[in-house]
Amino acid sequence: MRPSIPTLCALLGLASCTALGPSPQSKSPAGVSNMTLLVGQRFLDEDDWEPLEEPVAFAVEFDRYGRFDPAGFELGFSYAEDSGNVGAIGVDSQIWELYGGVRKTFSLAEDRLHPYLSAGASWSNAEIDASLGGFSNDIDDDALGFYLRGGVYYTFGGGLNLGLDYRKLLGADYDAEGESADGDFDQFSLSLGYSF
């Protein structure tokens, strides 16, 4: 399910409230680091992935940027899974991903509101399992791709971050046992992190 416009507006409205805690402490000019957990919904090509085209996705990532640097960097690990049925056959998918890239983070609203843009490379492994009765079979393959990303997070007192994230993966293709699937996706996530 894609986030609704009213939900996004409500979250951003909450982020603009400055009475929820003291202003964040100024970080060193040397840089700011963030550890972030993301939970979201991924949307794969329906023609290739139905009924597994909308897996739930989880990620943990680290990013760092210098306040006066042109850009910083990000590194992350994600996992997505879905399950369904094709007739009487049960199918499950698991996708593991490592990604990293260049990231530009902006600081607005007295260093509380942080929009960001990033681009980078992704390596992923997809495995699809099919089972019927006591019989099962699986196929898996690796894929390389690149991604574009944008989001925003709000820093509350104590360095706690809450945000929204969008990531688009391009150029990833899985091929195994004569079958192919487009690995590109759109992903919408909520993020919870900590700045240090």
Image: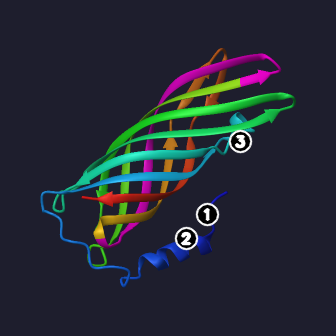
Q: CA distance from mark 1 to mark 3?
A: 19 Å
Residue contact at pointers 1 and 3, CB within 8 angstroms: no
Closer mark to the observer between disc 1 and disc 3:
1
Report the amino acid beneath label 1.
Pro
Task: State whether the magenta stretch is mostly helix, strand or loop.
Answer: strand
* Colouring of the image: rainbow
Relative to 89, residue 70 above or below: below
Q: What quarter of the picture does the N terminus occupy?
A: bottom right
Pick the residue in front: 134 or 56: 134
Q: Residue at x 51, y 48 (%)?
A: 168
Which residue is denoted by mark 2 in the rendering? 8
Q: What span is colored magenta in the figure?
A: 130-157
Q: Compared with residue 188, is residue 5 higher up or lower down, i.e. above or below?
A: below
- The first of marks 1 and 3 along the sequence is 1
Queried whether the magenta region covers residue 142, the answer comes back as: yes
Alpha-carbon span between mark 1 and mark 2 = 7 Å
User: Residue 172 in the image: x percent, y percent?
Assistant: 52, 33
Residue 69 screen position, x and y as percent: 17, 57
Point out the residue furthest to the bottom here. Answer: 19
Of the residues under marks 2 and 3, which one precedes in the sequence? 2
Q: Where residue 149 appears, x then y in whole percent? A: 43, 52
Give the residue pinned by disc 1: 3
**Labelled disc at residue 46:** 3
Say which of 53 and 129 sits in front: 129
Residue 75, how many percent across, how many down?
34, 42
Q: Residues within 10 Å of mark 1 (few under 14, many from 20)?
A: few
Rendered residue at 48%/74% (across/down): 12
Do labels 2 and 3 touch, CB within 8 Å?
no
Position of residue 107 in the picture relative to residue 125 (left or right): left
Q: Rate crowding at label 3 as few (under 14), some (14 to 19) or many (20 or more) other CA atoms within 10 Å.
A: few
Q: CA distance from mark 2 to mark 3?
A: 25 Å
Mark 2 vs mark 3, foreground winner is 2
